[in-house]
Image: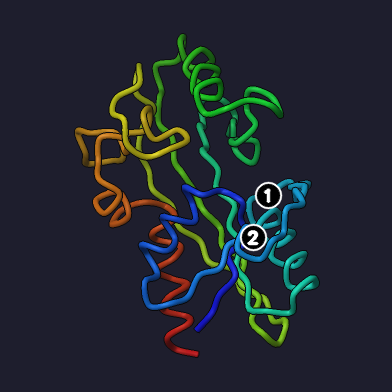
Amino acid sequence: MELVFASHNDNKTREIRELLPQYEISSLKDLGFTEDIPETGDTLAANASIKSKRIYKEYGKAVFADDTGLIVPALNGEPGVYSARYAGSEANSEANMSKLLQNLSTQKDRKAYFETVISYIDKDGNESLFRGRVDGEILLSRQGKEGFGYDPIFQPEGEKRSFAEMTSAEKNTMSHRGRALQAFIQFLQSS
């Protein structure tokens, strides 16, 4: 079964393909779609839905999109829906992590969680949403070289390592995206 993953992010696409080996996953790059889809929603679900609806309208194929946020309660939920552009629209992961570490520098409460919401639109245009969450804390400094995004500063509950110190296979067993995808896979297999 072919599924379109509405993302330009090569790291996410690789992770998705590892998690869904039984499906033929086409990325936006594979489709030749180069436009940026503005994430104007005020929730992760709204942003995921915006992306999947845009690609479904363009291609009419079964499509899914995700939006992920890192939520830090001590910072009133920041960076949240702005996780990818926390340090500005031109920022990269390093700048985003630096800003987060700076903003947390005076905080004792470093609890945080990642949440992923997947919007899936089937070939008939019906939308379903799937969520995954992993709780943990923000470390005092970067640890590890694997992963992407905030992985070097996020340590999941019950672990002594950051996501960036884990193999992708280890991370996928407990990650927010992995959990959302498991719910999505169960839905696909039961439909």
Quadrant housing residue 157: top left
Query: What residue is disc 1 on?
Result: 43
Residue 186 sits above or below residue 90 on the image: below
The residue depicted at 42 percent of the width and 85 percent of the height is 189
Query: What residue is disc 2 on?
Result: 28
Q: Which residue is more in the foreground, 117 or 38?
A: 38
The residue depicted at 43 percent of the width and 55 percent of the height is 14
Using a 10 Å C-alpha cutoff, classify the residue at mark 2 as few (fewer than 14 neighbours), some (14 to 19) or many (20 or more). Answer: some
Residue 37 x/y as whole percent: 76, 51
Residue 158 sits above or below residue 169 on the image: above
In whole angstroms, how far apart are the C-alphas of marks 1 and 2?
22 Å
What colour scheme does the image use? rainbow
Residue 25 x/y as whole percent: 50, 70
Residue 63 sits above or below residue 142 on the image: below
Q: Which residue is more in the foreground, 169 or 138?
A: 169
Callout 2, which amino acid? Leu
Q: Is residue 95 left or right of residue 161?
A: right
Q: Which residue is more in the foreground, 144 or 10?
A: 10
Residue 14's disc is none
